[in-house]
Image (spheres, rainbow, N blue to C red):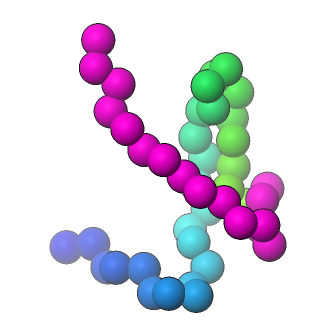
Amino acid sequence: MIDRPRVGAAAPDIELANVDGSPWRLADHRDRFVVLIFHRHIH
């Protein structure tokens, strides 16, 4: 089972590909508000 994140705790660093395919790291945006939206792309 995955532990639930705690309110106010630092998020783990993640790296994703943005819409143009270049890497995007959460750590590069530390001390800023960030909203992540996950969706499943269906062909």
Quarter of the image for residue 21 reads top right
Q: Is residue 2 left or right of residue 6?
A: left
Does residue 14 lie above or below 21 as drawn? below
Q: Is residue 29 left or right of residue 4?
A: right
- Front residue (pair 39, 30): 39
**Quarter the C terminus occupies:** top left
Q: Give the camera-side residue of 41 and 2.
A: 41
Q: Main secondary structure of the magenta part?
A: loop
Q: Residue furthest top?
A: 43
Residue 25 part of the magenta segment: no
Q: Residue at x 66, y 60 (%)?
A: 34
Position of residue 3 measured from the top left corner of the image (x, y, whole percent):
31, 79
For the point 63% across and 32% down, which residue is it?
18
40 inside magenta stretch: yes
Specify start and end residues of the magenta stretch as a single range: 28-43
Image vertical order of residue 38 relative to residue 23, above or below: below
The N terminus is located in which quarter?
bottom left
Q: Height in image: 15 above or below 1?
A: above
Query: Which residue is at 27% across, 72% downward?
Result: 2
At x 35% / y 25%, what residue is drawn?
A: 41
Where does residue 20 sit, x and y in percent of width and height? 67, 20
Measured as percent of width and height from the top left, residue 9 is found at 57, 85
Circle count: 0
